[in-house]
Amino acid sequence: MVFRKFGEEISSFVGKLVLVEVVDGKHYTGVLAGIDENLNIILDKVTGAGENVYKVAVNGTNVKEIKLTEKPFDFRALAERFSRVFPGLVTVREDIGAIIVMDKIKVTEKGVAEGSGLAAEKVKVIFDEYLREKKK
């Protein structure tokens, strides 16, 4: 159970900007493109690693820390907004990084991923409004 939760948490870093410190003290900043159970990682769009380094793979035995440097998406706050329009029909599924509305509309941090029709259009309007307000 504990390992599963760790795996879920660390996999939520994928696609996000992270700061990685390795055991020799070097730091890499980039988008976490991949990670496995041994903490072997691939960073994309790397900065701070020297000239002309755009992607780096780091052996997990050398990883000291992985820090998420961007604020995680707040699924609960968005779900609360959906619940005002669809009371009792909204489920937060952080394990899959989604909100499910009416058991048929799937919303990720990128928008409506599944679903169509008037309800899906309303969900999209709420999502877009939420993003606009968050950017202010």
Image: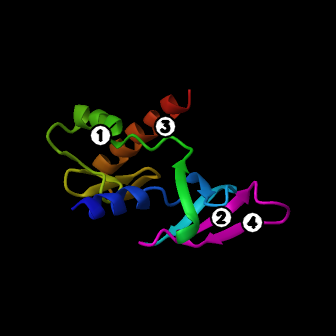
Q: Which residues are magenta?
A: 37-60
The image quadrant of residue 11 is: bottom left
Quadrant (top left/top right/bottom left/bottom right) for the C terminus: top right
What is the spatial separation of the Cα atoms under label 2 and label 4, in whole angstroms? 6 Å
State left or right for residue 96 relative to residue 65. left
SS for callout 4: loop
Q: Nearer the viewer, residue 1 or 98?
A: 1
Sequence-wise, the earlier of marks 1 and 4 is 4
Q: Which residue is mark 1?
A: 79
SS for callout 1: helix
Sequence-wise, the earlier of marks 2 and 3 is 2
SS for callout 2: strand
Relative to 11, residue 119 above or below: above
State left or right for residue 70 relative to residue 90. right
Q: Is residue 44 magenta?
A: yes
Sequence-wise, the earlier of marks 3 and 4 is 4
Badge 4: residue crowd in 10 Å (few <14, some 14–19, many ≥20): few
What is the spatial separation of the Cα atoms under label 3 and label 4, in whole angstroms? 29 Å
Q: Which residue is mark 4?
A: 54
Q: Which amino acid, mark 4?
A: Tyr
| Contact? badges 2 and 4 (CB < 8 Å) | yes
What is the spatial separation of the Cα atoms under label 1 and label 4, in whole angstroms? 36 Å
SS for callout 3: helix
Q: Which residue is mark 3?
A: 131
Q: Which amino acid, mark 1?
A: Ala
Q: Residue visible at 25% across and 59% down?
A: 2
Q: Which residue is mark 2?
A: 44
